[in-house]
Amino acid sequence: MFLISEDFWETKETENKGRGVFAKKEIKPGTVISDYLGKVINMADYDSDLDKKGLYLMYYSDQAAIYPDLTKPGPHLFNHSCAPNCRIYIYRGHTLFFALKKIAP
């Protein structure tokens, strides 16, 4: 779930990677962008068949992981980067994504 308004982001199809999230306006460093919400599962119950549409499982801890609602836009559409502009911070049961640096449109 995005915690910033739709004025700041949009999802678009990419050429080779499926959907992705893109900034529409500048996002300032430190801005909390989203919370990774979904069904919490026990890692012992992990079913790799659920990942055939793409790897959206978010590891929460050694015991638990989160499957997002793939019908809604959210941080599961963020692309991996070796030079990330976001970081994940777990706070009081929430998996929050925040901007590390200015994110330009």
Image (cartoon, rainbow, N blue to C red):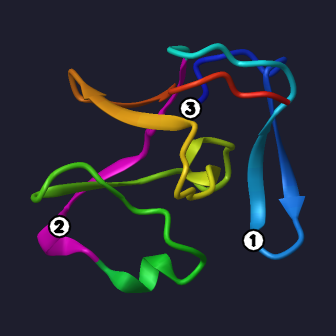
Residue 38 location (% of width, % of height): 42, 45
Pointer 3: what residue? 1
Task: Report the side of 75 relative to 90 (left or right).
Answer: right
Q: Secondary structure at mark 3?
A: loop
- Give the label, 2 or 1, closer to the camera: 1
**Earlier sequence position, callout 2 versus callout 1:** 1
Please identify the quarter of the rendering in which residue 44 is found.
bottom left
Tell me the distance, in whole angstroms, between the alpha carbons under discs 2 and 1.
27 Å
- Give the label, 3 or 1, closer to the camera: 1
Residue at image coords 62%, 49%: 78
Q: Is residue 77 above or below residue 54?
A: above
Pointer 1: what residue? 17
Tell me the distance, in whole angstroms, between the alpha carbons under discs 3 and 1.
21 Å
Pointer 2: what residue? 43
Task: Report the side of 23 relative to 1 (left or right).
Answer: right
- The 10 Å Cα crowd at callout 1, few under 14, some 14 to 19, many 20 or more, is few
**Earlier sequence position, callout 3 versus callout 2:** 3
Q: Is residue 83 above or below residue 86?
A: below
Q: Secondary structure at mark 2?
A: helix
**In the rendered structure, which amino acid carries the disc numbered 3?**
Met
**Earlier sequence position, callout 3 versus callout 1:** 3
Task: Report the side of 3 relative to 58 (left or right).
Answer: right
Q: The C terminus appears in which quarter of the rendering?
A: top right
- The 10 Å Cα crowd at callout 3, few under 14, some 14 to 19, many 20 or more, is some
Q: Which stretch did the figure color magenta?
A: 32-46
Q: Secondary structure at mark 1?
A: loop
Residue at image coords 67%, 45%: 72
